[in-house]
Image (cartoon, rainbow, N blue to C red):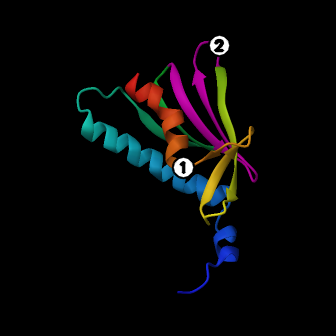
Amino acid sequence: MSEFDWVEARANCTVATVFKKLSEDVQNDLSRYEQLCPGQTQSRKFENCEKGFYVEFTHQHRVVFEHDDTEIKIGRWANVGGKHTPLTVLTVKLDDDGECILVDSDGDSWKPWQVRRKALEETLFG
């Protein structure tokens, strides 16, 4: 068995790479929800925007995913005065198991599915 190539793993563990995968996975989560919960789906739209993408659940509510070179920002936007409520700010790092993970400002580690759940669960499942 060959030794783990941590240099390649770290080179591939970037905000841009993780964000692209996050975008694809959110779209898959929404499709899966619609398959499992037919008739319970609200009007929703996945839309790319300048700094990332958002999922619009109603004209009054969006979950927004944005990124720059160093971090990923996730928040909720409500069309009541244009209020944007941050949920979390994340950076990426390679953990001791060689997995690319997300880390919040408190130093807590998150796997990508946990981040998606945190952002979408309340709106999808109430």
* Magenta-colored stretch includes residue 51: no
Quadrant that contains the C terminus: top left
- Quick check: 1 left or right of 86? left
Look at discs 2 and 1 and give the one toward the viewer: 1
Query: What percent of the width, then of the height, locates residue 67?
Result: 68, 46
Q: Amino acid at mark 2?
A: Gly
Query: What percent of the width, then of the height, locates residue 40?
Result: 28, 26
Residue toward you, 99 or 32: 99
24 is higher (above) or lower (below) than 76: below
64 is higher (above) or lower (below) than 14: above
Q: In percent of the image, x 65 and y 13: which residue is there?
A: 81
Q: Identify the residue position indicated by label 2 in the image.
A: 81
Query: What percent of the width, then of the height, locates residue 4?
Result: 61, 78
Residue toward you, 114 or 13: 114
Q: Quadrant of residue 17?
A: bottom right
Q: Earlier in the sequence, mark 2 or mark 1?
A: 2
* Magenta-colored stretch includes residue 79: yes
- Quick check: 111 left or right of 90? left
SS assignment at label 1: helix
Q: Identify the residue position indicated by label 1 in the image.
A: 112
Q: Quadrant of residue 37?
A: top left
